[in-house]
Image: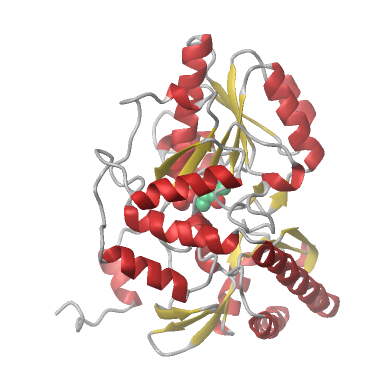
Amino acid sequence: MSQSMQVSRADFDRVMMPNYAPVDMVPVRGQGSRLWDQEGREYIDLAGGIAVNSLGHAHPELVEVLTRQAQQLWHVSNIMTNEPALRLASKLVAATFAERVLFVNSGAEANESAFKLARRWAHDNFGPDKHEIIACSNSFHGRTLFTVSVGGQAKYSQGFGPAIAGISHVPYNDIAALEARISERTCAVVLEPVQGEGGVIPATAEYLQAVRELCDRHDALLIFDEVQSGMGRTGKLFAYMHSGVAPDIMTSAKGIGGGFPIAAMLTTDRVAPALSVGTHGSTYGGNPLGCAVAERVLDIINTPQLLDGVNERSAQLVAGLRTLNDELGVFSTVRGQGLLIGAVLSERYQGKAGQIMRLAQSEGVLVLQAGPDVVRLAPSLIIPEADIRDALGRLRSALLKLAE
Ligand SMILES: *Cc1c(COP(=O)(O)O)cnc(C)c1O
């Protein structure tokens, strides 16, 4: 019955909540960096499910580990622990600054956990006045009430009642602004090492270093939101590794499950005790299916060959975009790190990122936007060279239509 029921994009407007405006095609199958819709049309996927499908669609090793785990054990809750969670946590600890891991189900939930941890840690060690969180303008940290309050885009928190108090925002990459704001009341400073939704803007290494020093001077925790920038996306396992500046708390989601919903919050032995037994939790967090898949994702991504490959593909894609731009002059700059790339629209094409996304789709290539003025690309970390070449050709056709 459920298999034979015919559905189409029109059903979305009838039965789904109106908070999304999905494109007009419905994908039904994916393989590597290609997707096919209900009509059998093929697309090259440079969107990657918004930086989630880190190993493309239907990666054979992920399919294998997911189906094997599905036959063994799906869910036990946190009344028990499980082997995939313990293995994944051990590998994350071995690969990063962290000594402790909490598994949750989304980027927002990982950040929610990070902010609660920071406040509780400061409360327990310094008292209730030390609860202020400083975040960056234009940052994005998720859609729960706490995370939209911390996020630096007012439009996401407006109209949802009083925002959570004790949060302020400073311009990104501006150390003087942070220095002026931070105080003994600050419990945490949170930032994305590469702002994703905010326009694909990397932090400078000097900024991260100076933020670290300010946090240390004021006994504030440094939180890196690596939900989008982590898991190989920038050419290192986590973006903080480019600068050598380690945070006290880090969140990971999106790419960590390669498309299976799982997220993690990582921290140190110094900070972790603040979430003692009973202070926090999540029914599905650390679910064996998600952890088994993420363990394999981590095994595959955290190798020099794969990470070098990200940098090679990045160079190919950026060079291709610049060549397109020499011809068409649509971008003022191409920025980003690794395979998180933002092509900033030139003056003449400002505000047209959404239109470019739709034109690209009709030419058979899927791209993202990051605000109205930036075309964002976040393809599979193992996208074949030939797919990049084809995708650039299709993008060229789309941009030619834009110019018409
Ligand atoms: C996507 C994103 C989030 C939110 O993740 P969800 O899984 O959608 O809750 C948080 N922070 C950053 C930097 C993101 O890119």
Task: Identify which residue, 91 or 70, lies in the foreground.
Answer: 91
Q: Give x and y (percent) for residue 381.
A: 61, 67
The answer to whether residue 143 of the structure is visible from this angle is no
Q: Residue at x 67, y 36 (%)?
A: 246
The answer to whether residue 374 of the structure is visible from this angle is yes
Instruction: Look at the image and tell me in which quarter the C terminus lies.
Output: bottom right
Residue 170 versus residue 359 in the image, above or below: above
Residue 323 versus residue 315 in the image, above or below: below
Q: Give x and y (percent) for residue 363.
A: 59, 85
Task: Identify which residue, 133 or 357, lies in the foreground.
Answer: 133
Q: Residue at x 54, y 49 (%)?
A: 227
Residue 403 versus residue 256 in the image, above or below: below
Task: Identify which residue, 365 or 387, lies in the foreground.
Answer: 387
Task: Identify which residue, 171 or 40, lies in the foreground.
Answer: 40
Toward the left, the furthest residue is: 1
Q: Give x and y (percent) for residue 22.
A: 43, 68
Residue 69 placement, left or right of 132: left
Q: Give x and y (percent) for residue 257.
A: 46, 58
Q: Residue at x 52, y 38 (%)?
A: 266
